[in-house]
Structure formats: C-alpha cells, structure tokens
Amino acid sequence: MWRWIGAVDRCWRCGGVLNSDFIEEVPLIPEHLGGKRDNFNLAKLDSKCARLLRSKLLPSLSAENPFACPECGEVGRVLKIDEEEERIVFELWCPQCGIKFKARDERGEEIC
Ligand SMILES: [Zn+2]
Ligand SMILES: [Zn+2]
C-alpha cells in the first residue's frame, strides 16, 4: 500500500526520500477522467516510481469512467492503492453517497 499525505518528502510508492531534482507529481486519477490537481489526487513520486505508475495505470479507453461512483457518477476520491502484477487497483470513496467502490477495468468487471 502507498503512503499518503503527511510524508511530503517521501515517495508515495517506495517511501524513499525525494531528491528535489527527481520529484514528479502524478495524478492518480487522470485529469481527463475527472482527477483534480489537489493533495488527494497528486502523488509525489520519484522518477522511477512515476514511470511505473504511468505504465500500470488503468486503461482509459472505455466509454465508462472507471473512477466514477456506480451510484451517482461522481468521480471518487482515492482511498487506497494496491499493486497487482499487471495493474493498479484503486479503492475509491464517493463524497456524495459515502460509499466505497473499486475502480473497474475497461471490460466493466470489478477488480478485486
Ligand atoms: Zn519511489
Ligand atoms: Zn456517489
């Protein structure tokens, strides 16, 4: 599991101390899918982990936004991230409905 806010000088993924030359801020939910550029969605990562995150992010080709709440359609907030072999699994929370859900992949199947 990744580290979150409170460890500002550490890489969110590996926990390594961030060298200011190699910090990248990567939106966990891509901006074109409703991800905001705020503390809840911007992960501070070193270059290596940023590259890895980009390579594993869920495909965004499907018509349905995988980050949208299944009840109301609002884009959720990332609570937790787990890594599996091929992909990253997002646990999200909808501020409107108060429910938790997981990011679904492009075939519309729940990833768990
Ligand atoms: Zn790292
Ligand atoms: Zn909702």
Image (cartoon, helix red, strand yellow):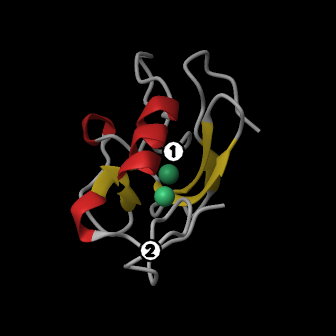
Rendered image quadrant of residue 31: top left
The residue identified by callout 2 is 17
Q: Is mark 2 within 8 Å of ligand 1?
A: no
- Left or right: 27 in relation to 2: left
The residue identified by callout 1 is 69
Percent from the top left, x then y, of residue 110?
A: 70, 31
Furthest residue in direction bottom, as rendered: 6
- Left or right: 101 in relation to 11: right
Query: What residue is shown at x 41% (from left), y 24% (from top)?
Result: 60
Rendered image quadrant of residue 104: top right
Q: Nearer the viewer, residue 78 or 101?
A: 78
Percent from the top left, x then y, of residue 62?
A: 45, 16
Q: Is residue 67 visible?
A: no
- Tell me: residue 38, above or below residue 109: below
Query: What residue is shown at x 48% (from left), y 39% (from top)?
Result: 52
Q: CA distance from mark 1 to mark 2?
A: 34 Å
Where disc 1 sits, the SS reads loop
Where disc 2 sits, the SS reads loop
- Quarter in which the N terminus is drawn: bottom right
Query: Mark 1 or mark 2, which has the lower sequence index?
Result: 2
Query: What residue is shown at x 52% (from left), y 32% (from top)?
Result: 56
Q: Residues within 10 Å of mark 1 (few under 14, many from 20)?
A: many
- Tell me: residue 87, above or below residue 63: below
- Quarter in which the C terminus is drawn: top right
Which amino acid is tagged 1? Cys
Q: Is mark 1 within 8 Å of ligand 2?
A: yes
